[in-house]
Amino acid sequence: MDRRRFLAAGVMAAVSPPLLTTEPARGARRIAVPSPTASLVTRWDTDPWSRGSYSALPVGTSPAVRHTLADAVIGGRIVLAGEYASTRYPATTTGAHLSGEHAARRLLDRVKARTAVVIGAGMAGAAAARRLADAGLEVTVLEARERVGGRIWSNEDWGAPVELGASWIHGTRGNPIVPLARDAGLTLVPTDFDSYSTRDTETGAPSREAEIRWSRLDSLLGQLEQARPPRTQSVAEWLARRGWTTDRIDSWAAQVEITQSYALDPTRLGVRATQEGAAYRGGDAMVADGYATIVDNLLSGIEVRRRQAAESVKSRASRVDVALRSGGRVSADVAVVAVPLALLRAGLPRMPDMGERVSATLRGLVTGVFEKVVLRYDEPWWGDRQVYGVVGGGAPGAPAGSLASLRWTEFYSLTDVIGFPALVGFAAGRAGRTRPATIEGCVGEASAALIAAFSP
């Protein structure tokens, strides 16, 4: 199950490897790769209110931890919501939405409440707030940022929304996000994953060998989904026992298919991660016109207090008290804590009533790294494919497996989504975490990858 769910291709119906192309072994002509006219670079791992992208199952962890978190009721009046607590669609906006609704139902079934406080105005918090408000409760939403949406971030610096967080709806048939998008007046742009070309920075030409390797990896991962290896085994170990190597091309394929999907390197990713969750049918689609509009619509008519970070959440005999970093307090009959996993693990907010079982369960999950660089151009110089794999990434000629060579290894055309020529590239896992510290450095690496990939 592909997991480019929250921040990219971001958590999902499997993205199969491309059909083998019929392009010649070398490009017929040299392409003059221009410099981008503008760029956007994400830094979710250092964002104080996300501290990473989305949740993943490390070695030793079972998907059962998500059930524990989804069903937890803290102090009789507090529940958790987020993609990490989705048992069927973890690490996706769909999972976040369903988790928010589930959390609200848990409270409505257990407590006769008139008021509710929701901490976090991302997809999970917005869905919970909407369900509680529709049930007649007076709802207050506390959001630490100046904007709503959380890891859904529709940046409009270029005059049109560019998704720097979640971009896709994975599986459009039966997915509850689809009617929400239509109600918001958004356009869904189908992604054709067969419109794919894999190019090598060493040759500047299409690479049939890379596509063959990727196809083999996809086959191996399909076998893993049906196997029952011990959960103490990593995906990397399981693959190595079946002949998968760490050479230059195998490392590229694993980065694109595994690390960029789960935001965690195969050496850290547990085998159970590939077996959890479900998938909708109907193909994938990027959201145009502003994904965050869905969150805005869910919160319509509900009080949202921005720049209000929660310091602690405590359950009393008949209410929940929330202490704010600003020094204020908010009280309600019930509470939904809908902040990202990394914040919960860091005790933000503190929840003295959480208990060791829930705390230990949270520690069983990790938050991965998935970052983007968006490059704008005057013309779509790259051709008519929607997706380009780049073997060698941002460090053409670097040793096999070097972290720099595993950044910016795949680019998607955004032209049909945002209305002007642009490519988005990805960096995930350790390669993403060790990316250059500056915008210029990230753009320079991504540009170098493209120049080498298109210059025979």
Image (spheres, helix red, strand yellow):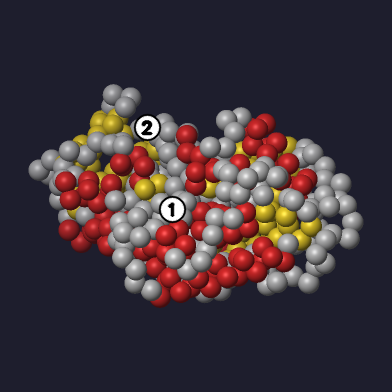
Residue at the extreme left of the image, as rendered: 317
- What's the distance in space between the residues labelled 1 and 2, CA to CA? 38 Å
Which residue is pictured at 40% across the width and 34% down the height? 144
Mark with earlier residue (1, 2): 1
Judge left or right: residue 340 versus residue 33: left
Question: Mark 1 Cα within 10 Å, few/some/many (few <14, many 20+)?
Answer: some
Image position of 78 with respect to 183: above or below: above
Q: Residue at x 32, y 27 (%)?
A: 325
The kind of residue tagged 1 is Thr
Query: In this rendering, is residue 392 above or below 250?
Result: above
Question: In front: 117, or 94?
Answer: 94
**Residue at x 70%, y 45% (from the top left corner):** 397
Residue 456 locus on image (x, y percent): 84, 52
Task: Check disc 2: other Cα within 10 Å, few if <14, some if 14-19, many if 20+.
Answer: many
Residue 267 tag number: 1
Specify whether residue 56 is in view. Answer: no
Amino acid type, mark 2? Gln
Depicted 120 relative to depicted 380: above or below: above
Residue under the image location 57 percent in, 48 percent down: 401
Image mark for residue 100: none
370 versus 328 height, above or below: below
Locate residue 179, reporting x and y percent.
51, 65
Image coordinates of residue 93 in percent, x first then y, are: 46, 56
Q: Can residue 428 be spotted in the picture?
A: yes
> Disc 1 on helix, strand or loop?
loop
Label 2 sits on residue: 308
Front residue of 335/354: it is 354
Front: mark 1 or 2: 1
